[in-house]
Image (cartoon, rainbow, N blue to C red):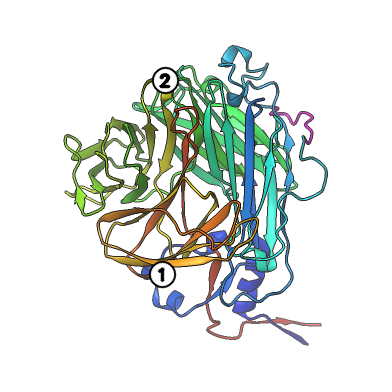
């Protein structure tokens, strides 16, 4: 008789090494049960990130910045981090960055949905098998520029000492055309379910969802769109096949004949896993990436509304079986107030509600807090996002802020510049204390850290610290030290020709560690010879 002993901690650690443990981190430590609180937290062994194809515009340029923060308790052992180009399976889809004002009629024979049947694609200017943005050591960012049109989507992994908190930022500037603006996004981990409140099928907008499959087998994703009266009628098959290690762009207006300016997109992976990001192009107000909302929750936080926002449009969707009644508050620098005329919002089950808040911040930075209004029955979960516009007339520029989860331990925004970065921190409940660290620059320097206290119910908008004697793009890491939950976003301003071009990225927790419970007993498997 042979005895094979497998401890529970060994099993969980092995799973962490294979999956990157993004799904194992769960909620905040405050909500954990006693057994989970007693668990040991270990750094993840492997991380996967997906960057969407930035633009095919001839007047675009893209900066990529990759970074892994130094962490206490992470052994300086071997590891790698880098990205490779994905195969492109678009089929003459009119690109929003090209500035040609494409429409459904010129989107290709398959209605702008890409090569659903796995048509031939190819690597573009970053092609080959040489990794993009390989890291040499934690704590030092690397950056590269891509000036040619048609830059590919990127698929990357980090393991060993580079995996915990690995972050890649993609920032594209388009100088002219309908896609004019700054389009920024943090490359995201693959998943199976995404919510995008705030997308549009209206004629003044071109919204593409970019679906990227990081794995060696095909993935299949379902796309469903919900408007003010419920799910929009589908004009074509809503199921999209994404070939292995490939990307497919889908023009949302080709999925339905109904036109609506404030709708919600749900992306669900039927098989496999995907990365999903929406590129939104407004014919009058520029363009940007719309990140996915945090998972449905009864209370949500939308952090970092700029002080000079000229308009703000809130879009909320209730995915459950119950209607949602929400209080709307603005957490400013000193306290939380109720926006005049927008004290509450009723969202019907399975429907999208949108309200125009105008210049809600009135010259002071803030964050939106949505909480249950109370009443009989349980509170209903929602997803939400805010479209923010700065500037007026022909000099407008737009960006999107989704509902963003709290930072449990740490979060990072890469690609900060010597000028133009604003970090917004909001404490929706109790007062919290955080440490903000600027990394070394891509061209040298030393990190600098500062500690901030954010009063409960307020937003603190600040210029993050700069690296000491450093040059080039740098990363900013926010670590929660004590107190209540904290939510964060980063705005990057790159004004050009009188246009206040900008982009805003949410900072969700980086899930750089995983809770590994201690084995309650020795689990043994008995095998007879």
490 horizontally vs 527: left or right = left
> Which one is in front, 257 or 483?
483
Q: Earlier in the sequence, mark 2 or mark 1?
A: 1
Quadrant for the N terminus in the image: bottom right
Which of the labelled discs sits on residue 394, or is there none? 2
Q: Is residue 124 left or right of residue 426?
A: right
Mark 2 or 1: the one toward you: 2
Q: Is residue 327 magenta?
A: no
Q: Is residue 68 above or below residue 507?
A: below
To which residue does mark 1 refer? 29
Callout 1 crowding tier (Cα within 10 Å): few <14, some 14–19, many ≥20: few
Location of residue 245 with respect to 94 vertically, above or below: below
Residue name at image x 63 percent, y 38 percent: 62
> Which residue is nearer to you in this view: 135 or 15?
135
Q: Report x, y in % for residue 244.
A: 74, 42
Image point (71%, 74%), residue name: 77
Q: Please give left or right for residue 81 compared with residue 267 in the image.
A: right
Q: Which residues are magenta?
A: 115-123
Q: Nearer the viewer, residue 27 or 308?
A: 308
Report if the CB atoms under discs 2 and 1 are less than 8 Å apart.
no
Cα distance between the residues tagged 2 and 1: 47 Å
Predominant SS along the magenta part: loop
Quadrant location of the C terminus? Answer: bottom right
Secondary structure beneath label 2: helix
- For this view, does 505 lie left or right of residue 388? right
């Amino acid at each position: 008789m042979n005895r094979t002993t497998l401890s529970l901690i060994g099993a969980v650690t092995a799973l962490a090494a294979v999956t990157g443990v993004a799904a194992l981190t769960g909620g905040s430590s405050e909500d954990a049960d006693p057994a989970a609180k007693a668990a040991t937290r270990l750094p993840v062994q492997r991380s996967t990130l997906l960057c969407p194809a930035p633009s095919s515009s001839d007047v675009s340029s893209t900066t990529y910045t990759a970074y892994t923060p130094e962490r206490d308790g992470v052994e300086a052992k071997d590891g790698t981090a880098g990205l490779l180009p994905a195969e492109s399976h678009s089929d003459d889809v009119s690109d929003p960055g090209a500035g040609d004002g494409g429409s459904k009629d010129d989107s290709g024979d398959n209605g702008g949905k890409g090569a659903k049947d796995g048509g031939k694609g190819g690597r573009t200017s970053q092609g080959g098998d040489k990794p993009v943005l390989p890291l040499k050591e934690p704590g030092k960012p690397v950056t590269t520029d891509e000036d040619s049109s048609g830059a590919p989507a990127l698929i990357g992994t980090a393991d060993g000492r580079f995996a915990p908190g690995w972050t890649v930022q993609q920032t594209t500037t388009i100088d002219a055309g309908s896609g004019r603006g700054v389009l920024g996004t943090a490359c995201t981990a693959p998943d199976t379910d995404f919510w995008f409140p705030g997308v549009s099928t209206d004629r003044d907008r071109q919204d593409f969802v970019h679906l990227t499959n990081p794995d060696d087998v095909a993935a299949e994703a379902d796309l469903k769109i919900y408007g003010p009266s419920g799910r929009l009628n589908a004009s074509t098959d809503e199921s999209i096949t994404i070939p292995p290690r490939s990307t497919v762009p889908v023009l949302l207006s080709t999925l339905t004949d109904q036109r609506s300016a404030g709708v919600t997109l749900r992306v669900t992976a039927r098989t496999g896993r995907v990365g999903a990001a929406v590129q939104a192009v407004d014919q009058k107000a520029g363009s940007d990436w719309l990140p996915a909302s945090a998972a449905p929750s009864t209370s949500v936080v939308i952090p970092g509304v700029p002080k000079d926002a000229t308009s703000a449009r809130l879009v909320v969707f209730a995915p459950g079986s119950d209607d949602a009644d929400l209080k709307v508050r603005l957490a400013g620098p000193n306290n939380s107030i109720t926006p005049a005329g927008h004290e509450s919002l009723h969202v019907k089950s399975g429907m999208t509600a949108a309200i125009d808040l105008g210049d809600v911040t009135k010259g002071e930075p803030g964050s939106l807090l949505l909480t249950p209004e109370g009443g009989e029955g349980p509170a209903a979960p929602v997803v939400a996002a805010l479209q923010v516009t700065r500037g007026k007339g022909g000099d407008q520029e737009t960006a999107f802020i989704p509902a963003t989860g709290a930072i449990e331990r740490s979060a990072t925004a890469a690609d900060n510049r010597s000028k133009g970065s604003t970090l917004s921190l909001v404490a929706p409940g109790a007062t919290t204390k955080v440490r903000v660290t600027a990394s070394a620059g891509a061209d040298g320097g030393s990190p600098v850290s500062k500690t901030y206290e954010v009063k409960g119910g307020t937003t603190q908008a600040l210029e993050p610290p700069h690296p000491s004697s450093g040059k080039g793009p740098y990363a900013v890491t926010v670590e929660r030290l004590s107190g209540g939950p904290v939510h964060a976003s980063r705005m990057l301003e790159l004004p050009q020709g009188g246009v206040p071009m900008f982009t805003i990225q949410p900072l969700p927790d980086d899930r750089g560690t995983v809770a590994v419970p201690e084995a309650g007993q020795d689990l043994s498997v008995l095998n007879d010879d």
